Amino acid sequence: MLEEMIQQILNGCSEAVSKAQNTRELIEAKVKFLGKSGGLTMLLKELKNVPPSQKPAMGKRLNDVRGHLEEAFARAEDSLKTKERAQRITAETLDVTLSKQSTEYGALHPLSIVKNDIINIFTGMGFQIKDGPEIDFEYYNFTALNIPEDHPSRDSADTFYINDKMLLRTQTSAVQVHVMEQQKPPIRILCPGKVYRPDDDATHSPMFQQVEGLVVDKHITISDLMGILGEFAKKFFSSETKIRLRPSYFPFTEPSVEVDLSCSMCGGKGCRLCKGTGWIELLGAGIVNPAVLDCSGIDSTEYSGFAFGMGVERAAMVKYGIPDMRLLFDNDIRYLKQFR
Ligand code: PHE
């Protein structure tokens, strides 16, 4: 009778041990069979009803069973613990090969890159950076620059007027006058800034940027202009780049020139970029008209100077071969990314 119950416990235990999926289930089973009110403890209590002659044998038998079961539980617990540890390690493993979510980095706009490049090249040659007002008097934008009252650029079709006397500057040349009023020669300045004109097509925008250069000192000649701009062209475009001067006209310079660059794409042979001429127009320049110096209080019998004005968008388009200026203002990130 007792032996039968022992068998039941042994079977129950071995079933519970093999069924247990984890240590928690195993411990529950162990408590059920071996705990204070577990099956085996109950059997030990039955021992008092066993006839005295069988008691020692039965006691030993029950002790052996207990030892056997404890061992079986311990072994099972060991192997479940090992299994659980392995599972935990797998679950907690970091996959270092997993690609992280990519972060988009910002970058300078191509126009800022080009403007900074221009500034760096000229400051490297000793030019000082100057600023001027975008809303200016007609006097600075036109009159003081020797632009006659009836000049077509003064027309309201070509200039944004704010009132009779004030306008959005159409050229950074206006800053030349501000500087010359405040500073005596030697002057060697560069004025980057926004200018405004009522134009809007593939190569013109109502707002664009210019960089104005002005050098005033004793004995300044057109050779100085050629030397500085030739050096700039080599640094900004390539060491192969040459410049060429063509006669032109601006009321504030005399003589006036257009400065062309040898085409970087064909090296001067003629291609689509330079429209077959081998040269690309870059900027306007000239020897400062003595009338402009005198008007700003600089003695033109003692001093002379040169000035130039370059479009930043134009420089960027030439440098990167950008066909349409609007690409620079649309701010399509996919396009702008290429310049990073
Ligand atoms: N201001 C002229 C323009 O906007 C460029 C220029 C600047 C020409 C200085 C000569 C000297 O076209």
Image (cartoon, grey):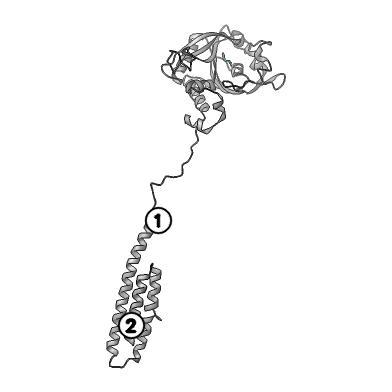
The residue sitting at the top extreme is: 301
Front one among 30 and 297: 30
Residue for badge 1:
92
Q: Is residue 201 visible?
A: yes
- Asked if the residue under mark 1 is in contact with the one under mark 2, i.e. CB atoms within 8 Å, the reply is no
Q: Is residue 315 above or below residue 25?
A: above
Q: Tell me if 135 is positioned left or right of 263 in this view.
A: right
Q: Quadrant of ligand 1?
A: top right
Q: Quadrant of the N terminus?
A: bottom left
Q: Is mark 2 within 8 Å of ligand 1?
A: no
Residue 75, x across and y down, in percent: 31, 70
Q: Residues within 10 Å of mark 2 (few under 14, many from 20)?
A: some
Q: Earlier along the polypeptide chain: callout 2 or callout 1?
A: 2
Front one among 94 and 76: 76
The residue sitting at the right extreme is: 164
Q: Is residue 61 above or below residue 312?
A: below
Residue 247, x across and y down, in percent: 54, 7
Front one among 5 and 90: 5
Residue 221, x across and y down, in percent: 51, 8
The residue at the point 37 percent across, 60 percent down is 87
Occupied quadrant, residue 192: top right
Q: CA distance from mark 2 to mark 1?
A: 43 Å
**Which-is-in-front pick, marks 2 and 1?**
2
The residue at the point 32 percent across, 79 percent down is 66
Occupied quadrant, residue 47: bottom left
Question: Which element type, helix, strand or loop, lies under badge 2?
Answer: helix
Residue for badge 2:
6
Q: Amino acid at mark 1?
A: Glu
Occupied quadrant, residue 68: bottom left
Residue 231, x across and y down, in percent: 45, 16
Q: Amino acid at mark 2?
A: Ile
